């Protein structure tokens, strides 16, 4: 497995991974799945200082397309200029690739990209019941900085958000 910058042809695979999380669990606060075109637009927004990465299988067969195992991205933390050195991360792993270190590799490489792009603070905002994501982030140096109570509603449930922070 290796990571690389996201490319437009990754849009269908990324949309499939993301949309599985939109439809079933309460992992993302989106309520409507993304189209492939919307995912391509998302990819275009994640060029430059706020990159997106994909983890792909290292395939020895040059004829076979590399399978996207997961993706991660940096986004602006807030709009006001004083927040320019802070970002928010997102990490999603295909359900069939979980437990293989994909999330850890993506997050570690994303933190390197954040540091290389001059960011100082990375925030993770995670639905409080997503223990795997909370463990992933704490294993990479994130610390709990707060809990936002009942800030979202999905599948008939009020959801809390755990906020973690990593200073680079």
Image (spheres, helix red, strand yellow):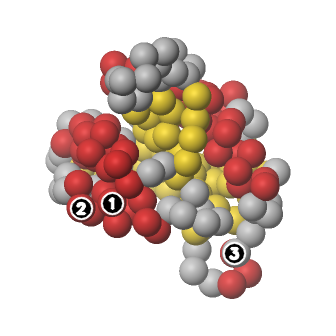
Within 10 Å of the Cα at label 1, are there few (<14), some (14-19), or many (20+) other Cα atoms? many
Using the image as rendered, state which of residue 168 and residue 64 is in the foreground.
64
Residue 94 sits above or below residue 119 on the image: above
Q: Residue at x 70, y 45 (%)?
A: 111
Tell whether 9 sits left or right of 62. Answer: left
Residue 74 sits above or below residue 107 on the image: below
Quadrant of the drawing holding the N terminus? top right
- Write down the residue under mark 2: 37
Tell whether 83 sits left or right of 163. Answer: right
Q: Residue at x 55, y 48 (%)?
A: 5
Q: Nearer the viewer, mark 3 or mark 2?
A: 2
- In percent of width and height, residue 47 lies at 54, 64
Q: Residue at x 38, y 54 (%)?
A: 8
**From mark 3 to mark 2, how far is it between C-alphas?**
30 Å
Query: Helix, strand or loop at disc 2?
Result: helix
Within 10 Å of the Cα at label 2, are there few (<14), some (14-19), or many (20+) other Cα atoms? few
- In percent of width and height, residue 19 lies at 25, 44
**From mark 3 to mark 1, how far is it between C-alphas?**
26 Å
Whether pointer 2 and pointer 1 mark residues with C-beta atoms closer than 8 Å, the reply is yes
Tell whether 148 sits left or right of 163. Answer: left
The tag on residue 83 is: 3
How many numbered discs, if any?
Answer: 3
- Residue 18 visible? The answer is no
- In percent of width and height, residue 79 lies at 57, 80
- Residue 32 visible? The answer is yes
- Write down the residue under mark 1: 40
């Amino acid at each position: 497995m290796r990571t690389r910058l996201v490319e437009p042809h990754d849009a269908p695979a990324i949309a499939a991974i993301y949309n599985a999380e939109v439809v079933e669990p309460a992992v993302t606060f989106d309520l409507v799945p993304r189209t492939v075109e919307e995912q391509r637009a998302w990819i275009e927004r994640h060029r430059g200082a706020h990159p997106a990465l994909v983890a792909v299988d290292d395939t020895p067969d040059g004829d076979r397309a590399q399978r996207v195992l997961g993706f991660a991205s940096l986004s602006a933390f807030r709009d006001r200029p004083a927040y320019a050195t802070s970002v928010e991360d997102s990490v999603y792993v295909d359900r069939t690739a979980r437990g293989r270190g994909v999330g850890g590799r993506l997050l570690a490489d994303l933190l390197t990209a954040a540091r290389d792009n001059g960011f100082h603070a990375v925030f993770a905002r995670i639905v409080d019941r997503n223990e795997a994501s909370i463990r992933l982030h704490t294993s990479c140096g994130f610390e709990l900085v707060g809990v936002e109570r009942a800030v979202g509603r999905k599948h008939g449930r009020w959801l809390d958000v755990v906020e973690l922070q990593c200073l680079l």
